[in-house]
Image (spheres, rainbow, N blue to C red):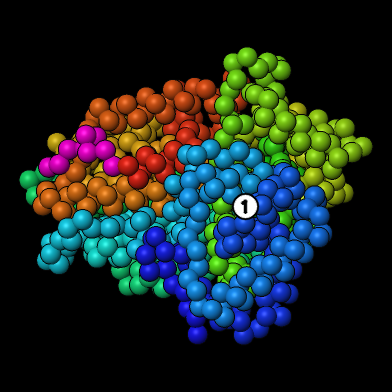
């Protein structure tokens, strides 16, 4: 049996690939290749053969990261599939090691061809890291001088939260041999994916990208999985990496207080019975997320409603909407998923929209992953990683240019630059085609603001839903709520049995309601004020040594992207900081005020030139003063670099 496993970064890296499975059933290999994307297969073939000519022949037919299907001629597709099958079978037969990734320019050319656009040289190092899937994983902690076991034993870390980011932190600490305890308020892991189970709940970033880089899943049933499958993924990772036994469920952290003399944190927790426990930690990692404290709208009479009122993130198990008159407030990402899912069942669905969102279709949104594609993802070396890069580009950095304000661009505030205008045109055409003949709905659904000003929503049959006879879209504003339903600004009463609040979260109150007290009794919420959270690289605040945040201030992504990527980057920075402490025998590490302030100034300066601060636009990414506290202004590749490049001058050891 030929099992090719990555032993060393310089070797052929292909995760863990068993080529004997291919050799055992060549017909299955050929059949599976017929179901996989030809452009991705071509990249694998070029990597295996070094055939530069093939790259050049395929290039004209790949005009974007996800839209190569239309133009690639059949004979070229067939050639790619046949040659790839033959090549893989040869490797299986000979047992030769797979070749490494090509160097510099060739790799950059492959990256550019993969997505049908110029990919700058900035990306080669980052993508090499991902494509090589090297062991040991450079994104984990690689010791320079491994501390004595006793030193590690005396370095307990408390992680707050067992959602996607807390589990990631735990896995990385576990791999580094650093002891940890996770405190989780819920009865299960998964965070948002555990708490949210409203009808239609699922992801709108494709799963083959929205997953841990070290835990690819080749079995996703859909390209965009629903909540249950996502939650199961995080459950499985928790068990696979031995994290569960370190979690204290149904326990909340109420405070964390730093003691400068001992360099320890006192973490106060309260469990379901009300019992308070104090844990001593050398470091604390907050992984509480941003979107977990539901925001109910401040509408007069809200509590007088006589029917059932439910927030999307606090759904009632077994809530039966069949035959009910339902009012839904809010049309963001959650509303987009709830509305079309429940509309066929309810007697009447009245949607109360304050502002419309831009909606984009995705041909894979409802699609199942074929068995052939799953097989290829699991068995064809490099395929899953190349596919992941294509998704990375389509859903993240490939969109970054559309977010930048061009000062010379003026079309009356509809868009902010030429690319952004092109995206607007595409989405306008889409909604106009879907709502053809319904000028009333076209007018209500067309945002006045530029694309990406609010999160773009992936179409969940929203416009079809709006044209159902039992669905109404009201935009006139809410006056008050009464026992019978909702009274609109024009005095109309919309009677309701159920009100669904798809109204989002209290995002600006980061880390609430915990009290975090750093050096000299400094209270983090006083440092930040009511809604102005800041942090060095979104991770550290001066005066709070050995206190780290995952998904902290200015780390959110509203244009696409993947928060798992951000979390993994942050963990790398945190692990490097902890390495400094552990290898030097210091008590703790802190970021300097100068480094923090310079970082925040740069973030603010960039945001001033980006879409989210566009005049007249409302979104939850800004605080009362208008400062963007929630979002990352950088490309993901920039963030990767920042979190990878540890700058000793930005820190001080205690
Ligand atoms: P959201 O994006 O904040 O949307 C809230 C909606 O409620 C908006 O339409 C907002 O209108 C409306 N609203 C708020 N207060 C209102 C009021 N007083 N009266 C009338 N309307 C009101 O919340 P969300 O949809 O829960 O999404 C939050 C975030 O969660 C998303 O940005 C995304 O990051 C994440 N999410 C992701 C997924 C996914 O991956 N599929 C699914 C759900 C959520 P305005 O726009 O006018 O403020």
Q: Is residue 649 magenta?
A: yes
Q: Which residue is mark 1?
A: 52
Q: Is residue 433 above or below residue 84?
A: above
Q: Position of residue 592 (x, y in %)?
A: 22, 33
Instruction: Kindly tell me whether mark 1's CB lies below 8 Å from ligand 1.
Output: no
Q: Toward the viewer: 189 or 177?
A: 177
Q: Quadrant of residue 276?
A: bottom left
Q: Quadrant of residue 427?
A: top right
Residue displayed at 24% across by 29% down? 593
Q: Is residue 359 above or below residue 385?
A: above
Q: Is residue 576 left or right of residue 241?
A: left
Q: Is residue 561 left or right of residue 168?
A: right
Q: Is residue 536 above or below residue 37?
A: above
Find the residue positioned furthest to the left. Answer: 261
Q: Is residue 96 left or right of residue 374?
A: left
Residue displayed at 76% across by 31% down? 425
Q: Quadrant of the C terminus?
A: top left
Q: Is residue 249 visible?
A: no
Q: Which residues are magenta?
A: 646-654
Q: Position of residue 273 (x, y in %)?
A: 32, 65
Q: Position of residue 33 (x, y in %)?
A: 70, 69
Residue displayed at 30% across by 27% down? 597
Q: Is residue 587 magenta?
A: no
Q: Estimate how packed mark 1 is, as few (under 14), some (14 to 19) or many (20 or more) residues with alpha carbons within 10 Å.
A: few
Q: Is residue 174 visible?
A: yes
Residue displayed at 85% across by 46% down? 467
Q: Position of residue 415 (x, y in %)?
A: 67, 24
Check disc 1 and report its element: helix, strand or loop.
Answer: helix
């Amino acid at each position: 049996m030929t099992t090719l496993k990555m032993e060393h970064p310089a070797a052929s890296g292909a995760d863990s690939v068993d080529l004997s499975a291919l050799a055992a059933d060549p017909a299955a290999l050929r059949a599976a290749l017929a179901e996989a994307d030809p452009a991705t297969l071509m990249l694998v073939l070029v990597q295996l053969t070094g055939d530069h000519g093939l790259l050049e022949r395929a290039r004209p037919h790949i005009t974007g990261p996800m839209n190569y299907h239309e133009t690639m001629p059949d004979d070229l597709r067939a050639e790619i599939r046949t040659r790839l099958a033959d090549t893989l079978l040869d490797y299986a037969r000979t047992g030769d090691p797979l070749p490494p990734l090509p160097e510099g320019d060739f790799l950059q050319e492959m990256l550019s061809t993969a997505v049908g656009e110029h990919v700058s040289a900035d990306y080669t190092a980052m993508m090499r890291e991902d494509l090589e899937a090297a062991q040991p994983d450079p994104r984990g902690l690689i010791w320079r001088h491994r501390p004595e076991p006793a030193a590690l034993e005396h370095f307990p870390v408390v992680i707050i939260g067992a959602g996607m980011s807390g589990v990631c932190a735990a896995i990385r600490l576990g791999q580094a041999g650093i002891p940890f305890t996770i405190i989780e308020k819920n009865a299960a892991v998964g965070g948002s994916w555990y708490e949210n189970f409203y009808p239609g709940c699922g992801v709108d970033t494709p799963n083959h990208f929205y997953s841990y880089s070290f835990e690819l899943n080749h079995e996703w049933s859909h390209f965009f999985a629903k909540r249950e499958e996502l939650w199961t993924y995080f459950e499985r990772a928790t068990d696979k990496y031995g994290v569960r036994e370190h979690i204290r469920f149904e326990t909340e952290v109420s405070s964390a207080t730093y003691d400068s003399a001992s360099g320890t944190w006192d973490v106060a927790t309260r469990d379901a019975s009300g019992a308070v426990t104090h844990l001593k930690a050398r470091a604390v990692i907050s992984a509480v997320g941003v979107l977990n404290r539901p925001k109910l709208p401040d509408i007069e009479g809200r509590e007088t409603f006589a029917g059932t009122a439910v927030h999307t993130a606090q759904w009632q198990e077994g809530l039966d909407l069949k035959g009910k008159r339902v009012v839904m407030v809010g049309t963001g990402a959650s509303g987009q998923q709830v509305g079309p899912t429940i509309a066929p069942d309810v007697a009447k669905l009245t949607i109360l929209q304050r502002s419309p969102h831009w909606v984009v279709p995705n041909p894979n949104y409802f699609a199942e992953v074929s068995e052939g594609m799953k097989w290829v993802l699991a068995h064809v070396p490099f395929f899953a990683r190349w596919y992941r890069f294509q998704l990375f580009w389509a859903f993240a950095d490939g969109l970054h240019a559309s977010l930048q304000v061009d000062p010379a661009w003026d079309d009356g505030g509809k868009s902010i630059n030429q690319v952004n205008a092109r995206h607007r045109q595409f989405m306008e055409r889409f909604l106009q085609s879907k709502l053809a003949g319904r000028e009333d709905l076209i007018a209500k659904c067309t945002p006045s603001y530029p694309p990406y000003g609010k999160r773009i929503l992936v179409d969940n049959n929203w416009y079809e839903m709006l044209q159902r006879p039992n669905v109404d879209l009201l935009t006139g504003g809410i006056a008050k709520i009464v026992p019978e339903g909702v009274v609109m600004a024009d005095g109309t009463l919309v009677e309701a049995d159920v009100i669904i609040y798809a109204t989002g979260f209290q995002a600006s109150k980061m880390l609430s309601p915990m009290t975090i007290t750093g050096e000299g009794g400094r209270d983090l919420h006083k440092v930040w004020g009511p809604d102005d959270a800041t942090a060095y690289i979104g991770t550290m605040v001066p005066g709070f040594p050995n206190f780290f945040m995952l998904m902290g201030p200015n780390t959110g992504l509203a244009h696409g992207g993947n928060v798992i990527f951000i979390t993994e980057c942050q963990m790398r920075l945190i692990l490097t900081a902890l390495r400094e402490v552990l290898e030097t025998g210091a008590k703790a590490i802190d970021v300097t005020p100068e480094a923090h302030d310079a970082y925040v100034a740069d973030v603010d300066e960039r945001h001033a030139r980006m879409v989210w601060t566009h005049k007249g636009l409302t979104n939850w990414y800004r605080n009362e003063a208008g400062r963007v506290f929630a979002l990352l202004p950088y490309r993901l590749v920039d963030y990767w670099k920042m979190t990878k490049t540890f700058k000793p001058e930005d820190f001080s050891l205690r």
